Amino acid sequence: MKHLDEEQLIEHYYGEDRDPGPAERHLAECAECEAKYSALQADLSDLRATDIPFRGSAYGERVWESITPSLPEVPDRELLWMRPVLWRGLVYAAGIAVLVAVTFYAGRMWEHAKAPVTAVKPSAPLPQPSKEVQRVVVVVLSDHLDRSERLLVELKHADAGSSELLSPLRDEARTLLSANRICERQAEESDDPQLEKTLASLDRLLTGLADQPDGLNSAALARLQQEMKAEGLLFEVRVLRSKMPTRNPDNKHAL
Amino acid sequence: MVGMDKNDHASIRAVLSGDKDAYGALVARHSQSLFRVAYRITGNEADAEDVVQEAFLRGYRKLATFASRSDFGTWIYRIAVRCALDRIASRKVDESRRAANEDDPELQAVQVADTAAGPDRLLLSKEIGALQETAMRGLTPTERAAFILRHLEDRCTDEIAAALGIAPNAAKHAVYRAVHKLRQRLALLRVGT
């Protein structure tokens, strides 16, 4: 059984315990606590014996007469800004404003600190080629168009009688053919119709030129020259090549 | 009580409107209760009367800050309690000297015997009063005021806390400490007599 301590007994005596039931039950069962409580009651009842000196019914009037000379004509008119409640409110408002400002500033600082990380992360999985890769492709394409143009010029001015010139053209066509197919795939990926069309025409011409195991005869040469002229292939290659230096590698349409 | 509140509020409005004499009605209505608590806290008639006057003066000056929803009696009562505590604080040096002397059980017995020796102290109630006053001097001002408000003025913990300007829990513990000390001292004093 847990006995009641002095604080609990005092609390119970003044009726300050929220639920007096448990204390009452304990006091009814526990002789030791009941004895302590009786002693407390006796002590506190003794302390009620103070007499207040009598002040007659006119005491209030006497007090009034004694203070009247000291009273100002009107009570202090407290100005609004002097009220403690107002000052407390202002202090709280200022505190909250400072807190909000600090939080906002901290948030901005945190965002700035995190910005480089967030900028790098989404760029990593992008399927687009990097600038370096695009620059290499442009150089390769430019070189390919440059070599193709020279081949086309030589083909245009080729003479069926100069057989020593035709064999190198055929060999060059074979070399350019593989490069042309790589460039075609790049052109397809870059969605550049003009480049695709030109490279497709170039592919047919290079194929026709490369597929001459015994060298170009006059008929085959004339047919290829005619084909090149009909499609305006040399002109198309020159146009593309002229655009190459100004083409922006960042633009996918450049390919 | 409601009628009294209405009278109080009417008087307050009149005072704030410039009718200084209307404050006289408030003074007359609440002087007795203020004197009672002031006397109990100070233990001295002259001090209690000074406290009553000081409380009404302070109340008049601060009347513009009085919230009309409050009870004027409670408000001026709290001011009186503060004034009484201020009065006790102003004579703190003397009180502490006396309390130091009374901490000596031998002196306590002598003092009680001396005060009980006169013809006016022969009645039991007077003797108890002397014992009580002696024991009360050993309390701190806050303990003394908290005990008086709780035990003699029947004020609840929240009212005591508001009057003393402390937290309710602190007010409750001030009452506990006061009762504990008083019982200890009264036991000693009884032995001495």
Image (cartoon, grey):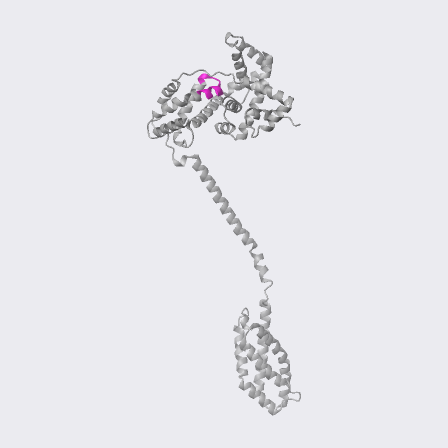
How many numbered discs, if any? Answer: 0
Q: Residue B97 in magenta?
A: no
Residue at the far left in the pictured view:
B18
A171, A44: nearer the viewer: A44
Mark yes or no: residue B44 visible. yes
**Residue B133: x %, y % from top left:** 52, 16
Residue at the far top in the pictured view:
B119
A75, B70: nearer the viewer: B70
Q: Residue B39 in magenta?
A: yes
A87, A244: nearer the viewer: A87
Q: Which residues are magenta?
A: B35-46
**Residue B3: x %, y % from top left:** 39, 27
Give the residue displayed 44% in from the left and 22% down from the top: B33
Chief SS of the magenta region: helix
Quarter of the image where one finds residue A24: top right
**Residue A74: x %, y % from top left:** 34, 28
Give the residue displayed 35% in from the left and 30% down from the top: B13
Q: Quadrant of the C terminus of chain B?
A: top right
A148, A41: nearer the viewer: A41
Q: Quadrant of the N terminus of chain B?
A: top left
**Residue B131: x %, y % from top left:** 54, 15
Q: Quick check: A251 above or below A83?
A: below
Quarter of the image where one finds residue B23: top left
Mark yes or no: residue A241 visible. no
Give the residue displayed 55% in from the left and 83% down from the top: A233
Q: Quick check: A219 above or below A6?
A: below
